[in-house]
Image (cartoon, rainbow, N blue to C red):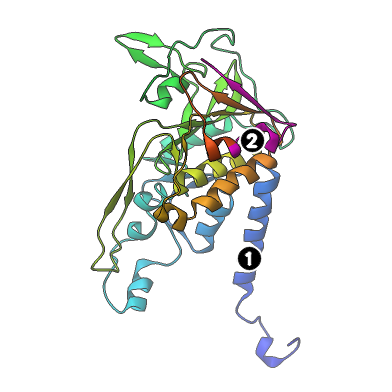
């Protein structure tokens, strides 16, 4: 309709928006079909910010905010001077804690190194296996770090030096890399290698952490809030983080998945139910149902798995791919 009308000659003024929509659709489909990764090195505005999220995996440089609208336009909308920088809207202190940014880097040199590091876990094609490199550690070796009580799960995964002596972790030495560490801190997400084979990793933080909710500059009555979160518990943010990571490992990366299961359950209090912990817990099941690669549910020594936490990880969710093992 409207073809050949004088008012439509030369375009109707939305062609650029239509092009943006086309790019958005292609980026969304690309995430399902192949490996996608964005590096945000400068200001990313509007559809640019959406494309970063649609591709899911993001490396952000400290001076590269992701915003929907510039701060000047928001000030005009609000009728007062509220915001003074773009970072207040989409800088690292926003995008790291909310999980949009998977890794933060200081400069472009670090950014390129981070890209290459990530690509080292990624298969050559969307349908091939991840690249296996010469093993730095034998798969038959013993894991020397013994998880017990309250501990840093990164030591169990990547090893640790204690009194000048190295205690090996589950992954090949130096191969474990954590991602999304600023979001959903009761869960640790990363990639590593075992015997040279890349794997995706979901592990449990056993120590208590804090969730920081920043004050809103547009609300003069708001203030920073620090919410305590217990270890070995799934909260809305960490359940969402778990589901997101499983989806990322499955799409384009084709990684075997190892889940170090040591959960006491989900936080089901009033605030967390309001914050959609039920929704995000169900998303973990959804992500495992569609997983197309081997999944190992592993209860480490002195670990536990109770109630709803067991249910969302039970191998019957995807019996063709999932297996469960327990250590003592």
Q: Which of the two residues, 11 or 294, is positioned nearer the viewer here? A: 294
Residue 14 in the image: state x and y as whole percent. Answer: 61, 76
Q: Is residue 255 visible?
A: yes
The residue positioned 58% from the left and 54% from the top of the image is 54
Q: Which residues are magenta?
A: 311-328
Judged left or right of residue 70, residue 126 is right
The image quarter containing residue 136 is top right
Quadrant holding the N terminus: bottom right
Q: Which of the two residues, 76 or 276, is positioned nearer the viewer here? A: 276
Residue 159 in the image: state x and y as whole percent. Answer: 43, 17
The residue positioned 33% from the left and 38% from the top of the image is 209
Residue 21 in the image: above or below residue 156: below
What is the secondary structure assignment of the residue under circle 1?
Answer: helix
Q: Which residue is mark 2?
A: 253
Judged left or right of residue 90, residue 297 is right
Q: Which residue is mark 1?
A: 21
């Amino acid at each position: 309709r409207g073809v050949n009308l004088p008012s439509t000659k030369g375009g109707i003024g939305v062609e650029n928006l239509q092009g943006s929509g086309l790019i958005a659709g292609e980026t969304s489909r690309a995430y399902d079909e192949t490996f996608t990764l964005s590096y945000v090195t400068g200001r990313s505005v509007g559809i640019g910010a959406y494309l970063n999220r649609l591709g899911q995996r993001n490396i952000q440089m400290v001076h590269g905010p992701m915003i929907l609208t510039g701060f000047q336009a928001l000030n005009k909308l609000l009728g007062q001077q509220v915001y003074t920088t773009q970072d207040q809207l989409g800088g690292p202190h926003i995008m790291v804690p909310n999980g949009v940014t998977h890794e933060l880097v200081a400069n472009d040199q670090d950014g390129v190194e981070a890209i290459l590091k990530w690509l080292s876990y990624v298969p050559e094609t969307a349908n091939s296996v991840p690249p296996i490199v010469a093993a730095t550690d034998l798969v038959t070796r013993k894991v020397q770090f013994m998880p017990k009580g309250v501990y840093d799960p990164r030591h169990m995964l990547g090893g640790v030096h204690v009194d000048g002596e190295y205690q090996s972790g589950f992954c090949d030495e130096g191969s474990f890399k954590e991602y999304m560490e600023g979001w959903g801190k009761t869960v640790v997400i990363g990639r590593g290698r075992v015997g040279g084979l890349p794997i995706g990793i979901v592990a449990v933080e056993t120590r208590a952490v804090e969730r920081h909710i920043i004050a809103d500059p547009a609300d003069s009555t708001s203030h920073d809030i620090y919410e305590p979160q217990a270890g070995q518990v799934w909260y809305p943010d960490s359940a969402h983080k778990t589901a997101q990571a499983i989806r990322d490992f499955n799409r384009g990366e084709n990684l075997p998945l190892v889940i170090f299961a040591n959960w006491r359950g989900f936080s089901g209090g009033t605030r967390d139910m309001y914050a959609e912990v039920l929704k995000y817990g169900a998303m973990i099941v959804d992500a495992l149902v569609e997983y197309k690669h081997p999944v190992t549910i592993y209860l480490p020594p002195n670990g536990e798995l109770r109630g709803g936490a067991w249910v969302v990880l039970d191998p019957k969710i995807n019996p063709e791919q999932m297996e469960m093992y327990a250590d003592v």
